[in-house]
Amino acid sequence: MKKFIALLVLACVANVSAAADIVGNAKAAKVEQCIGCHGIPGYKATFPEVYSVPMIGGQSAKYIENALIAYKKGERKHPSMRGIAGSMSDQDIADAAAYYSQQKK
């Protein structure tokens, strides 16, 4: 049993370190879904309520990654963003974060 627990812990640590090793590639970013809302100055969405959509260009990559991961896990509550983030791989998230972090505010 101790060997099983040790292997389980090792597997979890390896998984965390593998996710931390992902490097975003701004040129590979699939941001077509993002631009439709986050690329329009002053844009207001109407689902699930009317709100101003933030411009995310120039945000730090870490902030964008953390936000997308939180949407994916359901820790941030927005149906559209949860669906979009939920469809993204860890690499997609890193790439989008790299892309937007290189944009101007």
Image: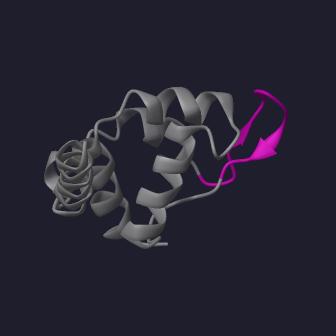
Residue sitting nearer the eye, 63 or 44 = 63
On screen, residue 27 versus residue 43, left or right, reads: left
**Magenta range:** 41-53
Residue 90 image-quadrant placement = top left
Predominant secondary structure in magenta?
A: loop
Residue 35 image-quadrant placement = top left
Q: Is residue 43 magenta?
A: yes
- Residue 82: x, y in percent? 57, 33
- Residue 75: x, y in percent? 64, 45
- Residue 69: x, y in percent? 46, 48
On screen, residue 52 versus residue 14, left or right, reads: right
Q: Is residue 72 above or below residue 21?
A: above
Considering the image in quadrants, where does the N terminus appear? top left
Q: Is residue 3 above or below residue 59?
A: above
At a point 20% along the width and 61% down the height, the residue shown is 17
On screen, residue 44 versus residue 74, left or right, reads: right
Q: Is residue 50 above or below residue 66?
A: above
Q: Is residue 14 magenta?
A: no
